[in-house]
Every structure is written in structure tokens, then in C-alpha cells.
Amino acid sequence: MDKRTREKYRKILLEQKEKLLNQINSLAQETFSSSQRDASGDLSGYSMHMADVGTDSFERELALGLVSNEQQVLYRMNEALKRIDEGTYGKCEVCGQLIKESRLKALPFATMCISCKEKEEGRGGR
């Protein structure tokens, strides 16, 4: 892969990384900045209903799961940026062949060509 193409993907990755960081920060602020009582506007001294507490817990766990998934994608993006710096970006880590540009356009942090990824998924790994 030539330098110009690598720089094109660096720009794409950096743009996607910035968007992802904004999403992570926004989700974290929405989820953890206020309690259920604050969010509902309930300022009374009475405790919340158990169903409300359960819903709040579920929503927080869901948000934590989403943040965790997004952090994994962020890690993969950072690894792809390292591969660009090392000159190994765009090569399949399994077979060493070039990853097709159509795959990199769809998933710029891909580490495997489609053939190797399909083989991996066929074995049940991820």
C-alpha cells in the first residue's frame, strides 16, 4: 500500500476516532451525571419505587456495555493507526496478503482479509 493511501486511511481513522470519543463521552455523561431521582425531577424525601430502581440499573448496565464495546473499537482504531506508522497497515495478519480496499473502506481497522476472517468465524472464534 502506498503512502498516499495509508494517509487517506489515517485521516478516516482519526475522524472516526474523534466521533467515537465524543459518543463515549456523551454516553458516559448522560448515564453517570445524575441519579434517577434527579433525572425524574423527584426532589421529595421519599424513596423511589423498586421498578424505577430496576429500570435505572438496567439502563446504566446497558450504557456500560455500550461504552465497553465502543472502547474496544477505539482500541482497534489505535492499533490500526500504529500499523499505518509501522507500514504494515492493509496486510492480513494471518496470511500476509493485502486486504481489499472495499473491506478497508467498510472497516478501516480490519486486521484480516475476508477469506481469513470467514475461516476464523467458521471455527467459532471472534
Image: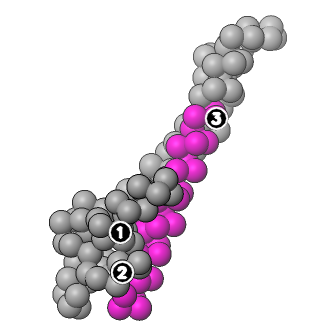
Left or right of 93, for residue 2: left
Position of residue 107 measured from the top left corner of the image (x, y, whole percent): 30, 62
Q: Residues within 10 Å of mark 1 (few under 14, many from 20)?
A: some
Q: Is residue 43 above or below residue 111?
A: above
Position of residue 16 measured from the top left corner of the image (x, y, whole percent): 34, 61
3 or 1: mark nearer the eye? 1
State the residue position of label 1.
Answer: 116
Position of residue 110 measured from the top left corner of the image (x, y, whole percent): 36, 68
The local secondary structure at tag 2 comes to: loop
Looking at the image, which residue is at 22% across and 87% down?
Answer: 1
Position of residue 106 measured from the top left corner of the image (x, y, whole percent): 25, 60
Q: Residues within 10 Å of mark 3 (few under 14, many from 20)?
A: few
Left or right of 57, for residue 7: left
State the residue position of label 2.
Answer: 95
Mark 1 or mark 2: whose residue is earlier in sequence = 2
Question: At label 3, which amino acid type do we have?
Answer: Glu
Cα–Cα span, label 1 and label 2: 7 Å
Q: Is residue 2 visible?
A: yes
Q: Are marks 1 and 2 in contact (CB under 8 Å)?
A: yes
Q: Which stretch appears magenta? A: 60-89
Mostly what secondary structure, the magenta segment?
helix
State the residue position of label 3.
Answer: 61
**Residue 49 part of the magenta segment:** no
Q: Is residue 38 visible?
A: no
Looking at the image, which residue is at 48% across and 62% down?
Answer: 74
Q: Is residue 81 above or below residue 18?
A: below
Looking at the image, which residue is at 49% across and 53% down?
Answer: 124
Left or right of 102, for residue 44: right
Looking at the image, which residue is at 63% across and 33% down?
Answer: 60
Question: At label 1, which amino acid type do we have?
Answer: Cys
Rendering quarter of residue 105:
bottom left
